[in-house]
Image: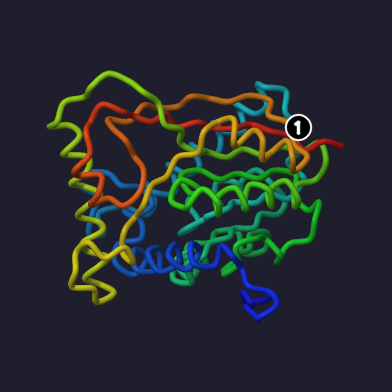
Amino acid sequence: MTPRESTPDSIDPLGSALDEVETTWEALAREDPLWAILVEPGKERGGWDPSEFFERGRAEIAQALSRARGLSLPVSADGRALDFGCGAGRLTQGLAAHFAHVDGVDVSPTMIELARKYNRFPDTCRYHVNPASDLRLFESNQFEFIYSNCVLQHMAPSLALSYIREFVRVLKPAKTLVFQVPDLLGGPKFTALSAASHAASRLDLRRRAGRLIGHRDERSPLAEMKMFTISQPIVEGALDRAGADVVHVDFLSRAERTFHGPLWERLAQRWNVGFVSKTYYATKRA
């Protein structure tokens, strides 16, 4: 794998956004990696049982594949799958039970080390640190199935859209791409209590990461788990220009409030706008 390179004639305009993601998730990976991936009350500070953690991943992948097949999308068990933003390998291991070969990619070296530790399919499942704003470590038309959940939402939209275009490039023609991105949605007001509770949980995660990497200012952007949204027309337009067609979009869940930008700024925002989590099912045009 070739590290991200920067020269006077070739400067990655997305490098700054990627560096921020890498710094944040490397800190979280060292502090409490499983909880950073699946934030649930009572699971912080090493509270996740790894067997339960990975069973959640297996169940999610089984459901995603069933949903894709229900939409008449091609899913070939003898093919190669990609888990983008694999973290500790929760979903990669689930994919490895269904595909002949699986690749997991993440920006955090510590997450990848942990994923390799938990790898139950060493002969068919490989993990890669990817310090680039693209997927140049893979040639075009490599994968039968690509999956990404709760990953793109932590990136600036410009960076997320860059990866979406790369998903299409490395996907084989007529094969299946499934990924999740939140979209802002107007809605009724929610109780301040539920919103504050949700924000406090995320804020605690950011504070702990900040202490880990040595930032005394608790509002330091280097340690924030940021959340962003991208509107559906923009996502669909990016897919279309890259050569893919959206087959279906699932609306999965509704949030209590706006989920966009730095966490500490969100604490001061009103609670009258939410977001909906959308999962896109797409195929690459032949």
Q: Which residue is painted at 51% across and 48% down in the image?
A: 157
The residue carrying mark 1 is 74
Is residue 124 among the parts visible in the rendering?
A: yes
Residue lying furthest bottom: 8
Residue lying furthest left: 193
Residue 189, placed above or below residue 234: above
Q: Which residue is painted at 55% across and 51% down in the image?
A: 158
Residue 55, placed above or below residue 48: above
As helix, strand or loop, the secondary structure at mark 1 comes to loop
94 vs 211, left or right, is right
191 vs 252, left or right, is left
- Figure quadrant of the N terminus: bottom right
Q: Quadrant of residue 191?
A: top left
Q: Type of residue at label 1?
A: Pro
The location of residue 196, given as percent across then percent down, is 16, 38
Along the viewing direction, whichever of 35 and 260 lies nearer the viewer: 260
